[in-house]
Image (cartoon, grey):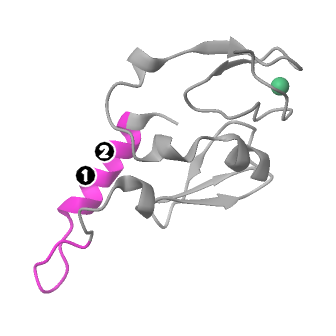
Amino acid sequence: MKSDELNAIYDKIKSLKNAGNLPLTSPKPLESTVRLIPDEKIAPSLFKPSQLEPNVYYATSLTIRAVKKDIFMAGDGFKDLEMIMPCLSCAKKLDLQFWKFCPFCEGKIAN
Ligand SMILES: [Zn+2]
């Protein structure tokens, strides 16, 4: 998932006002507003945004377990921290800042 997409979505939510002209969202970290829902039809390592709720994403249960949850509250600086390493089992190239283990095969990522 791209962080700038997430931020753009979140900025849009923040700009919405309810009938009392108060922001709909509290200034909590983005992390607490994002929900990941298992859907085994999604390709591994991908997050599909919900069409109905902007802060809901679908991914396979393995992808949800493998992803580092704190990426959802991180803002800028992803590129600086990029650390591409191969999975030791399937050799897929993975970015260590996003994954605890391989979202494709559950294998260990080289470190
Ligand atoms: Zn793998």
Q: Amino acid at mark 1?
A: Asp
- Left or right relative to 46: residue 70: left
State the mark number for residue 2.
Answer: none
**Vertical comparison of 52 with 5: above or below:** below
Q: Quadrant of the C terminus?
A: top right
**Which amino acid, mark 2?**
Ala
**C-alpha gap between disc 1 and disc 2:** 5 Å
The residue at the far bottom in this view is 20
- Relative to 38, is 80 on the left or the right? left
**CB atoms at circles 1 and 2 under 8 Å apart?**
yes
Does the Cβ of the disc 2 residue fall within 8 Å of ligand 1? no
Residue that badge 2 annotates: 8
Does the image show residue 54?
no
Left or right: 22 in relation to 34: left
Q: Is residue 19 above or below residue 12?
A: below
Q: Which mark is residue 11?
A: 1
Res. 98 image quadrant: top right
In the rendered image, residue 64, in percent from the top left (x then y), is placed at 68, 49
Which residue does the image show at 27% across and 69% down from the upper left?
25
Q: Position of residue 69 (x, y in %)?
A: 55, 47
Q: Residue 39, located in which quarter of the rendered image?
A: bottom right
Up-down relation of residue 2 to residue 65 (above or below): above
* Residue range highlighted in magenta: 4-24
Q: Is 74 positioned to the left or the right of 94 in the image?
A: left
